[in-house]
Image (cartoon, rainbow, N blue to C red):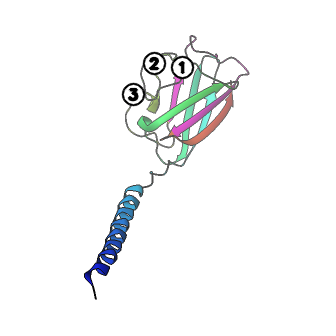
Amino acid sequence: MTARATSPVVGVVLLTAVTVVAAAAVGSAVVVDPPDPAPTASFDATADASGEISLTHQGGDAVDPDALRVRVRVDGDPLAEQPPVPFFSARGFESGPTGPFNSATGGEWRAGETASFRVAATNDPELRPGAAVEVRLYVDDQRIALLETTV
């Protein structure tokens, strides 16, 4: 028996071991923790011709306003300036939103609490009587609510 035949066998075994280790390393790097599930809650919306939009948390999980993104459409058109909740003063909105939308409030938005903001006359389109208002709420890019109301 010669020693020459063992070199290819050892080489194949080593290459197979390296491949298995590399596959395990790539596999463990790809597996990540799934994102936290979005809160499950129900809301109600109202809007009036003064430009005020009010959202009431009706039940379900509490929502962190810092993680919340609000998008508003009027008659199908998005507002030129969207509310950067929480805020106190923002372009396109009257100062001093109420409830959890006010940056000074702090804490989570819980069932029974109402948050509101007033769209400034400089924002477009305006909230006029009969206008259809759609408000979408997102947490971590997951939509948690689609609300529709009429001015």
Q: How dense is the environment of label 3, judged by Cα within 10 Å: few (below 14), some, or many (20 and up)?
A: some
Amino acid at the residue labelled 1: Glu
Spatial CA distance of label 2 from label 1 is 9 Å
Front in this rendered view, residue 136 or 53: 136
Q: Give the labeled residue for mark 3.
A: 103
Q: Give the labeled residue for mark 2.
A: 90
Residue located farthest toward the bottom when viewing the structure as drawn? 1
Q: Earlier in the sequence, mark 3 or mark 2?
A: 2
Q: Are marks 3 and 1 in contact (CB under 8 Å)?
A: no
* Residue 136, x across and y down, in percent: 59, 35
Q: Are marks 3 and 2 in contact (CB under 8 Å)?
A: no
* Residue 88, x across and y down, in percent: 41, 21
Spatial CA distance of label 3 from label 2 is 11 Å
Spatial CA distance of label 3 from label 1 is 18 Å
Residue 44 against residue 151 in the figure, above or below: below
Amino acid at the residue labelled 3: Ser
Amino acid at the residue labelled 2: Ala
Q: Give the labeled residue for mark 1.
A: 81
Of the residues tagged 2 and 1, which is closer to the observer?
1
Magenta-span inclusion, residue 119? yes
Residue located farthest toward the top when viewing the structure as drawn? 122
Residue 36 against residue 87 in the figure, above or below: below
Q: Earlier in the sequence, mark 2 or mark 1?
A: 1
Q: Is residue 32 visible?
A: no
Of the residues tagged 3 and 2, which is closer to the observer?
2
The region drawn magenta spans 114-138
Residue at 37% across, 66% down: 19
* Residue 33, x across and y down, in percent: 41, 55
Residue 42 against residue 16 in the figure, above or below: above
* Residue 140, x across and y down, in percent: 47, 41
Residue at 71% across, 18% down: 129
